[in-house]
Every structure is written in structure tokens, then in C-alpha cells.
Amino acid sequence: MWKVTSALIVAAFGIALGACDAETQSDFIACESTYALCTTAKCEPSDGSTDTVSCVCDVKTGYSVGEKPCSGKVETSKGTEVSSRYYPIKSYAACDNDRPWAWCLDKPCIVDKNDPTKAACACTVTKDQGPYLVVTDTYTDTTCTTDLWSSATVQGVNQITDFLKTTDELKPYDIKVLNAPK
């Protein structure tokens, strides 16, 4: 059975509260650092766990958004660690089914020693949080029914996009929903 961690529940509750009160400060932080970008990452089970998956993400340097401050590169016993953060997207497919997806925002990632442009991120498996998305520029009938993707809820992406409209460092794109009802 897939489990939702208490941190995810607390984060979702905090986002829901923020949506109810326009005066509430945003929980997002824009900053500049080296980070892992997981928006298009496919994920695989890791170490027999049913609540954590490994997602291979792109390592980037520049402005990004998360719920925690930027940490940049940190040397650990496992290797160079960076955090997974968000960068504006241009398009996505909205998925409204009960398939699991991976929550990677602010998760720890270990940079690949052989390919420093990639990092393996330990992301939390979640589902049943409402419509979620798959970041893609091409929609097919199988986009929402195959693979386990690093993702977020549609509501969450709308909230982070609204936050980005208030920043000077990083501006959002006009997002195209590929499978929007006609």
C-alpha cells in the first residue's frame, strides 16, 4: 500500500491554508544555486521501498524555487548532494486517475560521479491528491497511464506559478495544458 508521509500532508495542508487567505505569506523561496531539476524525470522503485523511488534528474545551476532555501552542492559520505527544485514549465498533460506519482520538491539528490549533469533523487511516492501533471510537450493516450513520473498537483503548479509572478529573479511561462477540454 502506498503511504503518504506526514511531511507531504503538512505541506498540502499549508498550501490549502495559503489558498484560503490571500494575506498569507508564500511558502516558496526563489534563489540561485546548483540544483536537480526533476520535472521530466521517470522514476523507478528503490531498495524495495514502496514509499520512496529514485528519479534521475538533470543538474542545473541558476534560479529555482522550493519550499526550503537553496543549499547548493554539499559534500556527503554518499557523494555530492543537491536538492531537487522547481523551474518554470511551458506545457503539461493533466492526469486525473489513481496512478501514483513521485513528489521530488526539496528532496535530496546525489550527483552522478560519472555524469555530473545527472543526479539520483530520493522522491516520495504519492497519489490521490487530486489532478496531477506530466510535464511534456507531446500528449498521447498513454501519457497519464504509463511510467511513474516526478510530478505535482495541478493546483500546486498553479500556486507556484502565481508565486513566480511576484518575483524579479524568475518569471513563469504561459503554460499550455495539452489535453485541456475543448
Image: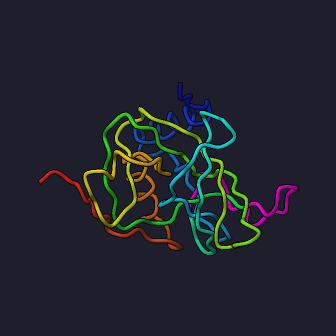
Check the image and name the residue furthest to the top: 1
Q: Is residue 15 magenta?
A: no
* Quadrant of the drawing holding the C terminus: bottom left
Residue 76 location, x and y as percent? Answer: 85, 57
In the drawing, does residue 175 fall left or right of residue 80?
left
* Residue found 55% across the figure and 32% down from its top: 9
Extent of the magenta region: 65-81
The color scheme shown is rainbow
In the drawing, does residue 93 fall left or right of residue 29?
left
Residue 146 location, x and y as percent? Answer: 38, 47
Q: Is residue 70 magenta?
A: yes
Residue 85 location, x and y as percent? Answer: 58, 59
**Looking at the picture, does residue 123 appear above or below residue 61?**
above
- Judging depth in this view, the residue of 160 and 144 nearest the camera is 144
In the drawing, does residue 45 fall left or right of residue 146?
right
- Judging depth in this view, the residue of 60 and 174 nearest the camera is 60
* Residue found 83% across the figure and 56% down from its top: 78
